């Protein structure tokens, strides 16, 4: 079965929405994720349904079939492996690689993907801390919480981000809050739900609620 790049992107979007929200993807959520109109989403839902790649129930939303999930998972695997390659081997910054990986993920060669995985040392996580599915579609599991969930004096390492936007990643670079950075909660401000944290054991910084809700921490 021939699948277009656009159809692949829709399957990936549905997978991510369902994973994030824990329920079928709504038309509005897909429209937002794909930055397109609801009418375009409706047309694509019909095409993907005709190819038996999704299940659609009116008023409930869209879920992937087994084949649809397999395609989406493989696409995510390629995307995240290419991001590792771009950062680790070509020295791109983590805020530069998403758009490039969006193009590279559509390369069809399975052999290339497996050799890339081996060349990179079979990484479990990409440069943003997202798990990379293995060849069988299994995702690595890691205990992590949002920084906003930590309490006073709790500490941990930055292991991922929920917001992948260029602006947020560049902000984290300026704050020296890259992956692997130790943080400790010194104070919580109830008024605006911001936090005063100790970064790398030496520098205090007040972080907004929005930042705290988009940083994943592995507690120590």
Image (cartoon, rainbow, N blue to C red):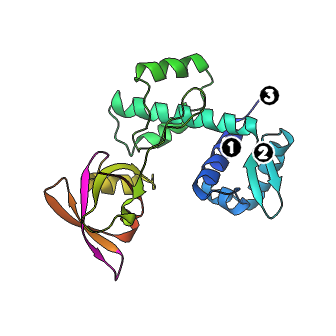
Mark 3 in CB contact with mark 2 (< 8 angstroms) = no
Q: Secondary structure at mark 3?
A: loop
Q: Residues within 10 Å of mark 3 (few under 14, many from 20)?
A: few
Q: Which residues are magenta?
A: 179-193
Q: Residue at 40% across / 23% down in the picture?
A: 121
Question: In the displayed structure, does residue 51 sit left or right of residue 137?
Answer: right
Would you name the residue on which mark 2 appears?
54
Q: Which mark is residue 1?
A: 3
Please, is residue 96 above or below residue 205 in the view?
A: above
Indicate which disc, 1 or 2, sits on the residue closer to the N terminus: 1
Please, is residue 143 above or below residue 152 in the view?
A: above
| Image quadrant where one finds the N terminus | top right
Question: In the displayed structure, does residue 38 sit left or right of residue 191?
Answer: right
Quote the CA–CA distance across marks 3 and 2.
Answer: 14 Å
- Magenta span contains residue 188: yes
Residue 5 placement (x, y as % from top left): 67, 36
Quote the CA–CA distance across marks 1 and 3.
Answer: 15 Å
Q: Residue at 49% across / 17% down in the picture?
A: 115
Quote the CA–CA distance across marks 1 and 2.
Answer: 8 Å
Indicate which disc, 3 or 2, sits on the residue closer to the N terminus: 3
Q: Secondary structure at mark 2?
A: strand
Residue 152 placement (x, y as % from top left): 27, 69
Residue 107 placement (x, y as % from top left): 59, 26
Which residue is outermost to the right? 50
Would you name the residue on which mark 1 appears?
11
Mark 1 in CB contact with mark 2 (< 8 angstroms) = yes
Question: In the displayed structure, does residue 166 sit left or right of residue 16?
Answer: left
Q: Secondary structure at mark 1?
A: helix
Q: Residues within 10 Å of mark 1 (few under 14, many from 20)?
A: many
């Amino acid at each position: 079965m021939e699948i277009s790049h656009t159809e692949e992107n829709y399957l990936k979007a549905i997978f991510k929405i369902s994973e994030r929200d824990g329920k079928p993807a709504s038309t509005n959520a897909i429209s937002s994720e794909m930055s397109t109109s609801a009418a375009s989403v409706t047309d694509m839902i019909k095409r993907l349904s005709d190819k038996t790649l999704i299940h659609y129930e009116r008023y409930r939303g869209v879920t992937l079939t087994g084949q649809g999930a397999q395609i989406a998972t493989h696409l995510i695997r390629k995307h995240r492996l290419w991001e590792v390659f771009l950062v680790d081997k070509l020295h791109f910054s983590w805020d530069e690689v998403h758009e490039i990986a969006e193009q590279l993920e559509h390369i069809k060669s399975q052999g290339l993907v497996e050799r890339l995985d081996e060349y990179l040392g079979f990484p479990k996580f990409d440069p943003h801390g997202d798990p990379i599915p293995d060849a069988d579609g299994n995702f690595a599991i890691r205990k992590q919480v949002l920084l906003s969930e930590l309490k006073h004096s709790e500490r941990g390492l930055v292991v991922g981000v929920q917001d992948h936007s260029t602006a947020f990643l560049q902000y984290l670079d300026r704050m020296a809050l890259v992956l692997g950075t130790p943080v400790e909660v010194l104070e919580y401000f109830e008024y605006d739900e911001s936090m005063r944290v100790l970064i790398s054991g030496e520098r205090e910084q007040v972080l907004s609620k929005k930042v705290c809700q988009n940083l994943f921490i592995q507690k120590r």
